[in-house]
Each structure stands twice: as structure tokens, then as C-alpha cells.
Image (tube, helix red, strand yellow):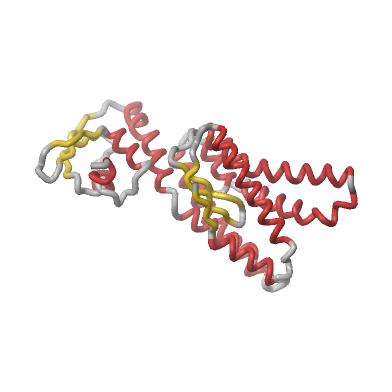
Amino acid sequence: MSIAVHPSFFAAAAVLLLTGNAAALPAALAVVLVHELFHARQAYERGYALKKISLTPYGAVISGEEIFSERDAVAIAAAGPLSNAVICLVLYALWWRFPAAYPYTKTIFDVSFAIGAFNLLPFYPLDGGRIILGISKNKLRALKGLKAAGVIGSFLMIVWFVVSAFFTVNPTPAVMAVPLYLGAVGGTEKERYRYLYECISESKLKKSPLEVKTVTVHWGLRLKTLLRRIEKKSLTNFIVLNDGLEEVTRLTENEFLKLLTVKPLSATVKESLGF
């Protein structure tokens, strides 16, 4: 498993240092790490092998070799904000028993509350957006709406930053807006085609009888070329030929759509099937 740090995390750290909030930097790092550990723990407990963890100013983005089930995806996404709630509750209990600890731990409380509350916003790719996506019936529509909300949310944060410049400059919204925007407009191809795979054939079959088409393709074609042959009123099966124009395999529409959940659209059929 690799651990990466998003450039916006360094930008957020620089903002804290330049604005005289250096004391908040260790608190922010600790809170984000705990947030990430809760995500990772939930994933491991459900049997998923994590491939990469990327730290951002608002938490962690995790990815693995396997696709999370709906139920597991909700639990894993909710684990991050839950960690922030646990931190706040523990600190509140600490203050109740040891009031003298308040001035030394209030920054951690504030950072944890802010990160937890921010992550619960209904924006993709925040945890709140992923929770809504996990419980949605029409996931393609939900993903599209949550991504749009993420873009709108990032622009609103830029507006917040601009307005704050007329009073007390607060660069934090601008720093947070960047990874939110990038996450909303990109990096969701696999999830999109996962939901396409889960919904499209079953949905088509429930609506009306379907004609089954067979299309012959060369294994040097890219997956995006084959995708154009998928139609609403039919099921498409693919016969794959090699360079000698010999048949090497066949793909049903469901098998092809499932392939899109793990391979990029730019990959060739040959590369995707491992020939």
C-alpha cells in the first residue's frame, strides 16, 4: 500500500504557517491521520486490500484493487466523520474532568469538528457525497448530481475566499476548494462505469424484450470504441479477433461493462484482457 500526499495538503500547511497559525498544523496533521486510519480500519475489517491512500486537507481518499459493495462503501465513508466525532467527544469529556486541558486541546477540537462537518457536505468526492451515493437507488443520476454539487461547492468556497478578502483574508476556503473541484470533475470514471455495469442491462431487460446483437472486433480497438456499440434497445455481445483474424474470446455486454470498472477507456481490448 502506498501513501501519497495531495499538493493541496502542502498548500494548506503553508497557509497555516504564513497566517501565523503554525500551532494548528500538528493538530490538523493528527486529525487527518486519525480520519484516514478510521477509513482504512473499516476497509480492512471488511476484507479489502487498500492500494493507495492520498491525504488531503479535508481527510483521506482511499482506493483498492476491489470495488466496495454498497453497504461497505457507506460504512467506510462514514468512518472518517465518525473519527472526528469521537475526537470531539473525547476532548469534551477530558475538559469536563480536567478543565485545565482546554486551552491546550481546543485547537484539535476545532480542527476535528471543521473537518468532520466539511466531509459530511453532500458533495462528491467528500464522505457525505459517498454516503448518499451508497444509499441511492439510481447511482448514475446520483453520481452526476453529487459531482455537480461538488463543482458548485468549490466555486462557492472561492467566492467565500474573495469576499473574506474585503475583511479578514481567509485563504483556507480557496485551498480546500482545489482538491474538491479536482475530485468532482475527474477520477470517477471507474465508479461511473461500475454503476453502468450494475444497472444498464438489468434496467433494459425490465423495460422491454431485447434483441441480441453480435459484433466482431479486433483486439487492437480501444474500449471506448466498443462502448459506442452499446445501445438501449439491444444487448451486444462481442467476438474478439487477434491479428491473424482468429477468434480468441467472446464478451457478453455485462462482461464488457464490468471490464470498464477496472480498466481505462483508452486501453485496448488486448491489454484489458491480458493477452
- Residue 247 appears at what percent x and percent y? 14, 36
Query: Which residue is nearer to you in this view: 46 or 165?
Result: 46
Determine the image quadrant of residue 10: bottom right
Occupied quadrant, residue 39: top right
At a point 36% along the width and 29% down the height, the residue shown is 202
Q: Of residues 109 and 230, which is closer to you in this image? A: 109
Q: Please, is residue 153 above or below residue 238 in the view?
A: below
Front-lying residue, 120 or 45: 45
Q: Position of residue 212 (x, y in %)?
A: 21, 30
Residue at the limit of the structure toward the bottom, as seen here: 166
Q: Residue furthest front?
A: 1
Q: Residue at x 28, y 43 (%)?
A: 272
Q: Residue at x 56, y 62 (%)?
A: 8
Q: Is residue 41 in sight in this rendering?
A: yes
Decide: is 203 above or below 224. Answer: above
Residue 185 appears left or right of 108: left
Depicted 160 relative to depicted 68: above or below:
below
* Residue 156 visible to an observer of this rendering: no
Q: Is residue 261 left or right of residue 145?
A: left
Residue 125 in the image, given as x and y percentages of width and height: 53, 49
Which quadrant holds residue 25? bottom right
Q: Measured from the top left, where is residue 13 in percent x and y?
A: 64, 64
